[in-house]
Image: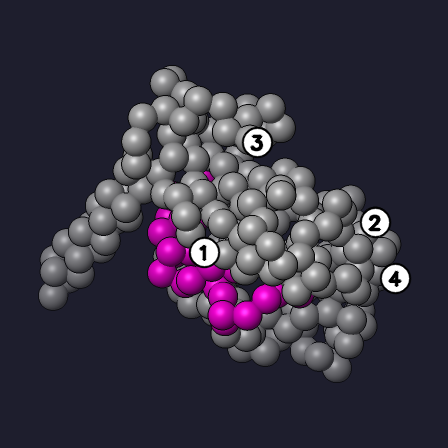
Amino acid sequence: MRLLAVLCAAACTVCGWLWLAPTSGAAGAPWFANAVGNATQVVSVVGTGGSAAQMDIYQRTTAGWQPLRTGIGTHVGSAGLAPQARSGVPATPMGVYTLDSAFGTAPNPGGGLPYTQVVGPNYWWSGDDHSPTFNSMQVCQKSQCPFSTAESENLNIPQYKHAVVMGVNKNKTPGGGAAFFFHTTDGHPTEGCVAIDDATLVQVIRWLRPGAVIAIGK
């Protein structure tokens, strides 16, 4: 049984990489090319109207930018896209953001990013901009948290079966927004995050490595 499990895991990994095989030749210069620095992995999100967007996955190689997967249906904020993040505004901020870590209520699907499994109700993302914990993951019982849980998000929800943290407002500027993730969709607009179907998200997480970015534009 142990050997079978190992073989199954290996097969899943191979399938993941086959899923992310180039769809065509080099893409030349995608819209984000001059904005992502030295990044070699880019998750491109382009708004298509309202809270809808299209996601394309790119890898930079010696031959140029390679589209690995295109045309992924994506949900963004219920207020669409905005030039910048703002607390309390359900819009997805445009720009280029790092993808540094991942988390989820499901076990780690693998990949190159640090992953935290959310087990139980004590995992939060602080949205309290009067606290030094603002815009960071915290683990505490609700009654003992050193921040306002009313202004924060509990991470034990179905939409966070899998999620990647977007580096929005990394300076923790008050009023600059918090809790922006690339996560599992529930089929509806988000509060400012980017969301796709879970099976596709798992494949992307397995592909991601440190230095990857998400580029969001119109």
The residue singled out by tag 1 in the image is: 73
Residue at 62 percent across and 28 percent down: it is 35
Q: Residue at x 79, y 64 (%)?
A: 88
Q: Earlier in the sequence, mark 3 or mark 4?
A: 3
Residue drawn at (36%, 43%) of the image: 69
Look at the image and give the residue range highlighted in magenta: 184-210
Circle nearer the viewer, 4 or 1: 1
Which of the numbered marks, if any, corresponds to residue 173?
Answer: 2
Element type at mark 2: loop
Amino acid at dot 1: Gly
Whether label 3 touches label 4, CB < 8 Å:
no
Which residue bears the numbered disc 4?
130
Mark positioned earlier in the residue sequence (2 or 4)? 4
Helix, strand or loop at label 1? It is: strand
Asked if residue 5 is among those painted magenta in the image, a careful observer would answer no
Quadrant in which residue 3 is drawn: bottom left
Labelled disc at residue 32 = 3
Inter-mark Cα distance, 2 to 1: 31 Å
Q: Is residue 165 visible?
A: no
Dot 4 or dot 1: first in sequence order is 1
Q: Quadrant of residue 146?
A: bottom right
Q: Does residue 104 lie above or below 33 as drawn?
A: below
- Considering every residue shown, the one lying at the far front of the view is 49
Residue 34 spot, x, y in % from top left: 60, 24
Residue nearest the observer in this picture, 189 or 19: 189
Label whose residue precedes the other's in the sequence (2 or 1): 1
Q: Amino acid at mark 2?
A: Thr
Could you tell me how far apart the alpha carbons at marks 2 and 3 are, in whole angstroms? 25 Å
Q: Which dot, 2 or 3, sits closer to the camera?
A: 3
Q: Is residue 115 visible?
A: yes
Q: Secondary structure at mark 3?
A: loop
Tag 3–tag 1 contact (CB < 8 Å) = no
